[in-house]
Image (cartoon, helix red, strand yellow):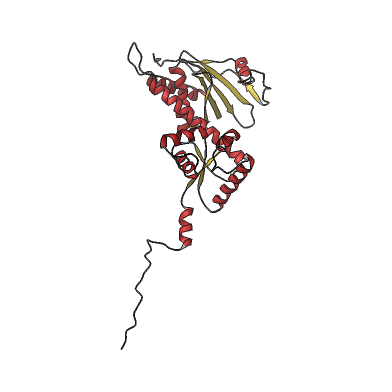
Amino acid sequence: MARTKQNTTQHHPKHPKHPTMRRTLRREVAGTFGLLADEADFAAMRRYRTFTFDDHTTYLREAEQLLKSLASQGRHTTVALFDPVEYDAFCAESGIDPDTSAARSRYTARLAADGATLPYDGRPLSDLVPDLIAEALRQSTRAYAESLLADIGACADCGEDIGQAAYARAVHLLTRVLHRVAGGRHHLVCSVSPDSEPLLAVLRAQTTDSGTVLVDEAAATDFTMLLAAGIATSSHGGIVLRTSNPGEADQVCGWRLRNQRLLPLTAAEVFDAYCTDSHTGEPVPPESGVDYAAPPDLGPDEEPHPH
C-alpha cells in the first residue's frame, strides 16, 4: 500500500514572516525626531539639496502630523532640537556628506543618546517646544558648570580643590535655605553670571505638614552645581525664592551671593529685581497677589569657607 508523502516543512516561531508581526515589532521600536524649531535654523538647512522643505510653517505642520500619526500607532517617539551648526560639525568630524538624509538620521541618533529630548505626548508643538528649549538650556548650563568646576584647579596657597570645595559650600548654603523656608510650594531660581550672560537654574520644592522639604534630586544637583560655579569664580549672583499657599498671596524674597555668602535682600531690593526687565532695564508692572518681603533668617553661618 502506497504511503502518502507528508510535508514536513515547519515555520519556526523564532523567524516570523507575517507582515502583521513585523508591524507589531516596529511599534515597539522607539524613535527620535530632530526638530528644526527655529526659523533661522530651518533656513540654514535649506542650502542642502536633499532637504526638500521650503516653508517653515508647512514643515512644522507636517512634523506635528507625523508625530501624531506615530503616536496613534502606539509608537514611542522623542523630540530633540536639530542644530544646524552642531550638525555641520558632526558631519565634518565623522567624514560624512551633510547633504544626505542618512547623515541627518545619524546626527539625530546621536541627539537621542546625548542631547536634550522630550517624549512626544500629543501636545501641539507650540506647547512642547518651549519645554524642549528649557530642557536643552538646563543640560547646557549643567555641562558648563560641571566643566568649570572640574577645570578650575587647586588653591595656590593650600592645594585644596577649588571646585570640590565650592560645591560643598553650595550644598551647605542651599541646605540652610531649605531648612528655613515656610510651609507651602516653593520655586527657587539661582542666577549666576560667570561671564557676561546670566545663567539660571530652577528648583521646585514642597514643604509637607510635618516640615519635611521634598525636592527633585536631579534638579537640586543642577541648582547646586550652578551655585558652586558662582562661588568658585566669585561671580555676581543670587537666589530668589517664591512661596505659594492656597488662598494667600505669594511671598517673594531673595539673597545676593557675595564672598561665598548669601546676604539677604530687602523687600525694596526684591521688588526692584522682580519688576525690572533683566535685558532692557525698563520697569515691569508688579504682579497682583504677590508680596515682596525680606527673606527668612538663615541663622549663623558656621561652615568654613573654601579658599
Using the image, determine if residue 127 lies above or below residue 170: below
Q: Position of residue 20 (x, y in %)?
A: 48, 61
Q: Is residue 63 visible?
A: yes
Q: Nearer the viewer, residue 53 or 275?
A: 53
Q: Position of residue 53 (x, y in %)?
A: 59, 43
**243 or 224, which is in the foreground?**
224
Screen quadrant of the C terminus: top left
Q: Residue at x 38, y 18 (%)?
A: 162
Q: Position of residue 5 (x, y in %)?
A: 34, 80
Can residue 124 be seen? Answer: no
Q: Is residue 6 above or below residue 248?
A: below
Rendered location of residue 113, percent (x, y): 44, 39
- Which sits in the foreground, 262 or 307? 307
The residue located at (34%, 12%) in the rendering is: 156
Q: Nearer the viewer, residue 122 or 303?
A: 122
User: Taking 55 as reference, is 258 above or below it?
Assistant: above
